[in-house]
Image (spheres, rainbow, N blue to C red):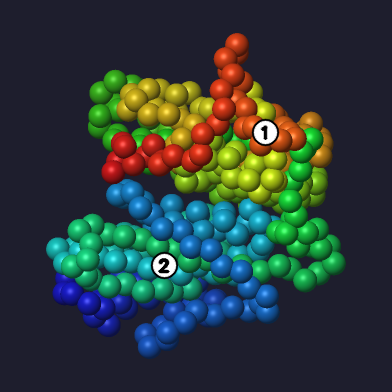
Amino acid sequence: MRFGKITENALKRSVLKQLRTEFKNKMSAAVGTDCAFSESKRTFSTIAPVTVDVQDAGYYGVVKAVNGLVSQGLTTDHVEVSVLLPSDAEEPVLKKIVKDAIDGAKACGVVYAGGHTEVTAAVNRPIVTVSGVGYYNDSRENEEKEVLFSSKPAAGQSLVITKWVAMEGTAMLASEKYQELTERYPAPFIDEAKGLKDSLFVGKEMEIALESGITAAHDLSGGGVFAGLWEMAGRAGCGLKVDMRTIPLRQETVEICEFFTINPYQLLSGGALLLATENGEKLVSDLQEKGIPAVVIGQLIEGNDKIVVNSDETRFLESPQADEILSALG
């Protein structure tokens, strides 16, 4: 493909045609338009770059952007996708990125409203960046959501994790390193790990959590659960104490992380939420009743110590490190 903005024909074939097919009843992108629409008056935005080289970058970027909004009690209005391509990229590469982004938008129930695509010598592989725009619903029944965005968790509150940590990284590794992994593990086992990609959207559990009563929510994506715990304590302005044995891990994650000698607690954990609440047992019960796995892993405490207990061993949490996915995928 040529350098610079892609041709209008390529834009129509590989981007706009797909958008119009999937979102035919929604106002969306068009040739010559420079911005996306928003039907709300009070908008919030997030940005989700996919910095690792994965086949499904469009999907992961969209879900991450939407989860960033949903986890703050916001309703997502739309997402936009920016794609930078190297000069040797072929048009089918762009087409797949857009298809994956559409699949992500459909999984989250949001509109892919457009974006930007360009071929540039500045990159040597496709780079996908997703922007999401969201808003608060102004109806009275959603007033508690506005409180969530500005509220702070506090010492004495329980910490709850939904589903399993490292799901996102596990799914990526299972897909990208499938051949290597299936030389050691049965193919159905690795297929199960790949399928975790379909469980990354957190909309259902956030609805339940808001109803149950929470003071804060954090999407455990970049840096994994250890980074998320550090950031939650920072938001609360206090310390924490968690039992490492209670942090939920899938067996697929344990095996794949052992295979690549990486730490699952520092691996991309999109799909899992870290929640702070006054009543952890109630929140867990409410989530489990609706089919969402959840567990209390500890609590926020007075002071600044961030304590992780593992059987007879006690350690202090370190500041967030580089995500382990980088050592496995680059």
Q: Is residue 229 left or right of residue 8?
A: right
Q: Residues within 10 Å of mark 2 (few under 14, many from 20)?
A: many
Counting from the top left corner in percent of width and height, residue 109 is at 57, 60
Residue at the location (23% across, 57% down)?
125
Q: Residues within 10 Å of mark 1 (few under 14, many from 20)?
A: many
Counting from the top left corner in percent of width and height, residue 40 is at 66, 77
Q: Is residue 281 left or right of residue 229?
A: right
User: 302 or 81: which is nearer to us?
Assistant: 302
Q: Residue furthest bottom?
A: 32
Q: Which residue is mark 2?
A: 81
Q: How many marks?
A: 2
Q: Which residue is mark 1?
A: 240
- Quarter of image, res 103: bottom left
Q: Is residue 136 above or below residue 248?
A: below
Q: Is residue 290 left or right of residue 47?
A: right
Q: Which SS class for mark 1?
A: strand
Counting from the top left corner in percent of width and height, residue 274 is at 63, 41
Residue at the location (38% across, 29% down)?
262
Amino acid at dot 2: Val
Q: Residue furthest top?
A: 312
Residue 299 marker: none
